[in-house]
Every structure is written in structure tokens, then in C-alpha cells.
Amino acid sequence: ILKRGPVTVWGAGEIGRGWIRDLRALGVEVEQAIDIDPRKVGIRLANSVPVRTPEDALARRHGPVLAAVGRRGARDIIRPSLAARSLVEGADFLFLA
């Protein structure tokens, strides 16, 4: 899945930032991050990764989505949002946390 283009990381909190740092250290291109917290939308992580709303980021994405949100219930929000865009779990998106 990581060979299918630059990744979008869903999660701009501590877990998502850690994954972004580790993915970039492995040479994986992270094109953007997604977060629903308006205080995070618009900032840049690791000096270059823009944080966008789900709607904006998913309209711009070029590769797989890696969900790195540890909050209880997050999967119940993220999964339907991605499925509504015809993304398939395991092929187009994965949960990391």
C-alpha cells in the first residue's frame, strides 16, 4: 500500500505526528495530514506537511490514507467517511492506531 503514491495520514495529534516522522525517516512521502480539530487545520507538521479537513484532504489525495488516531470511537467516524468515497480498507486505507 505504501508504494501506491504519497500517503495521507489521518491524525495530527501525537500519534499521527509520530507516524509522519517515522514514515518520512523511511523515505515515504507524506503529502498531507487530516484532522477535524479546527485548531490544527491550517498548520504544518514537520515543517512541511499541511493539515487539512477531511473533505479538503480527501479531494486532494493521490495515494493511500493511513489512519493514526488513538481516540476511542475514531474508527467509527473515519471508516464510514472513507467508505463513502469508495475507498476500500486494506487496499486504499489502513488503521495504524
Image: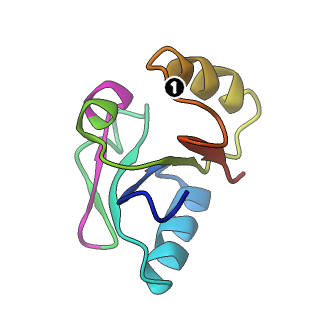
In front of the other: 14 or 53: 53
Q: Which residue is mark 1?
A: 82
**Percent x, y of residue 85:** 44, 19
Question: Which quadrant of the figure has residue 24?
Answer: bottom left
| Residue type highlighted by circle 1 | Leu
**Percent x, y of residue 46:** 34, 72
Magenta span includes 52: yes
The answer to whether residue 10 shows anywhere in this view is no
Q: Residue at x 43, y 31 (%)?
A: 36
Coloured how? Answer: rainbow
In front of the other: 64 or 77: 64
Magenta span includes 60: no
Question: Which quadrant of the figure has residue 88?
Answer: top right
**Percent x, y of residue 68:** 61, 51
* Magenta-tinted stretch: 47-56
Position of the N terminus by quadrant: bottom right
Question: Which quadrant of the figure has residue 76?
Answer: top right
Image position of 67 with respect to 31: above or below: above
Q: Residue at x 50, y 84 (%)?
A: 26
In front of the other: 43 or 34: 34
> In screen coordinates, is 48 left or right of 83?
left
Q: Residue at x 35, y 45 (%)?
A: 40
Q: Residue at x 38, y 50 (%)?
A: 63
The answer to whether residue 32 shows anywhere in this view is yes
> In screen coordinates, is 89 left or right of 55?
right
Residue pushed farthest right? 72
**Percent x, y of residue 28:** 43, 74
Judged from the image, the secondary structure of the residue bearing numbered disc 1 is helix
